[in-house]
Amino acid sequence: MNPPEFNSMFQYDDSTIEAKLREQVSSSISKGGVVALGFTVPTVALLAVLCVAGGRRDLQLGLAFASLGLVQSFAAYRFGKMGRATGRNGTYLLLPLVVLPLVAAIGSHFLGQPGGAAALLNAPFTFIMFHLVVLTGFALDARFSMLAGFVCAAGYLAMYLLAREQLAQISAPDPLVSRVFSDPAMHVIKAALLAVAGIVMALLSVTTRRLIFRVSREEQEKSFIRNTFGMIVDPRVRDRMIRGQIELGGEIRVNTVLFCDIRGFSTFSERMSPKELLHFMKDYFDLMNAEIRGQEGTIMEYVGDEVMALFGAPLPLPDHAERALGAACRMQQALAAQRPAWEREGKPPVRAGVGVHTGSMLVGNIGSSERYKYGAIGDNVNLASRLQGLTKEYGVSVIASDETVREAAGRFHVRELDRVRVRGREAEVGIYEVLGPIGEELPPTVQTLAAAYEQALRIYRQEAGPQAREAFARCLELDPTDRASALFLERLAVSPSASAGAQA
């Protein structure tokens, strides 16, 4: 069963985009209402002062319409703030604002204002309608823009018909000037332009909405790919792949590899149902991954219960060996802290072995042209895996190669365990138990055992059989569970003299 957060990535559709779009439109209309209030409030105040204090009754009609505009602006602000300024609500709310100049002009004619509709027909007052039709595009509603354009066009024609007789009385020295004011074709064209403006804004709204939906879908798809791909490979590898910074093939570079494997996994996995095992492994991997990524490591892959991590790629790390050893120690500490809780839940005591090795390897996108993965291959990668296997034989939690210990430059307490022969290598490899960072003091018993074991190992390499047996026996007296000392005693029992190291 997929976790809920994984399933949720598949649940995206246009309704989500539509909801966000409506929210944005309402926010824009609310802000527009604030701007409109900034103009209408002082206008109403000024006209009110002129009408009351100045006795300008001819401005009463203007005051009435300005007050209506103020009410409409406030309504746009409030409805936009509540997220209800879209669709039909937006039409009912904004259309009166768009046609307000027309209503004012036609009203002035019937109320007997000087010049009536004719005085306003060719004045800048009517050109406001073009701006208002254009502004409807911000609502991203094609039907509203077309409706506004055609209503304004029809209203303008109605205003022309009311003012036609007055326009016929206009005379000017130049007949062409008189014709501009009174020719029906001029006013029909102007009305047609208003309708065309509405159509253009409708098309622009449709195009804009399609663009927003397309971009939003692409972003959703990219987010889905990033999230899904990030579950398959390390997020940093994913991001570099998306940016095209990792190409097919790779490069030879020196890195540190870490392998971690649960001890006795087959035994305790048989006690759990598949569902219980999946949940447990998720908790276990989350615990391990947190420590690896905390040290800037890259999770390369999971093989059963085994984790492979790389330090130094894809992002270079000058202290990759130190970080890998730090991650190994923290992983063991995290397991020790979590173990009692798991045991209380009836889960077996979980222990893990960690192998760490530093060396040159091929790192990059490895595979065929049809299918590949980001990984690391080479003899040094295999050696790290074999060192992890040796943790069982030597009874320790973390084994690092001499290359890694040398690269970490004495920043960790270590105990030299042995020198081992590795298949495919002529030279033996020195292996060390990593006890902890230098900054953390070791328990006295661990320090005493490490010193005694170091002395025993030195005697063993001098081929002093009886003395070596006595030295390792003293180590077992200090810690009867020290598997490494027991291993050397078994080896000495077979051959009294010093022999070659173990096979890895």
Image: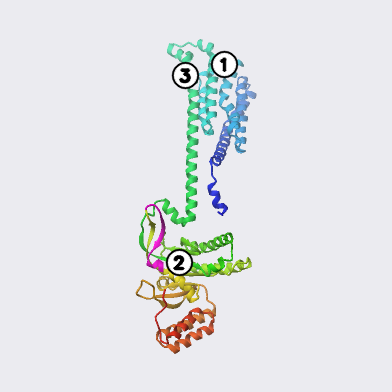
Element under label 1? Answer: helix
Give the residues in magenta.
369-382
Picture residue at 48% right of the left edge, 76% below the top: 394
Disc nearer the start of the sequence (2/1): 1
Look at the image and tell me whether residue 456 can be seen.
yes
Disc nearer the start of the sequence (1/3): 1
Residue 477's disc number? none
Q: In this view, does 159 lie to the left or right of 236?
A: right
The amino acid on which the numbered mark 3 sits, given as a three-letter code, is Ile
Mark 2–mark 3 Cα distance, whole angstroms, equals 79 Å
Report x, y in % for residue 242.
42, 51
Q: Name the residue under label 3.
A: 189
Report x, y in % for residue 441.
52, 75
In the image, 165 versus 224, the foreground residue is: 224
The amino acid on which the numbered mark 1 sits, given as a three-letter code, is Gly
Which quadrant of the view contains residue 496?
A: bottom left
Mark 2–mark 1 Cα distance, whole angstroms, equals 89 Å
Within the magenta stretch, is there residue 378?
A: yes
Q: Is 472 drawn above or below residue 273 in the view shown?
A: below
Q: In this view, does 436 lie to the left or right of 501?
A: right
Q: Name the residue under label 2.
A: 258
| Quarter placement of the N terminus | bottom right
The amino acid on which the numbered mark 2 sits, given as a three-letter code, is Leu
| Quarter placement of the C terminus | bottom left
Residue 116's disc number? 1
Q: Is 163 drawn above or below residue 64 in the view shown?
A: above
Disc nearer the start of the sequence (2/3): 3
Picture residue at 48% right of the left edge, 73% below the top: 391
Mark 1–mark 3 Cα distance, whole angstroms, equals 21 Å
Kindly report which numbered mark, 2 or 1, lies closer to the viewer in this rendering: 2
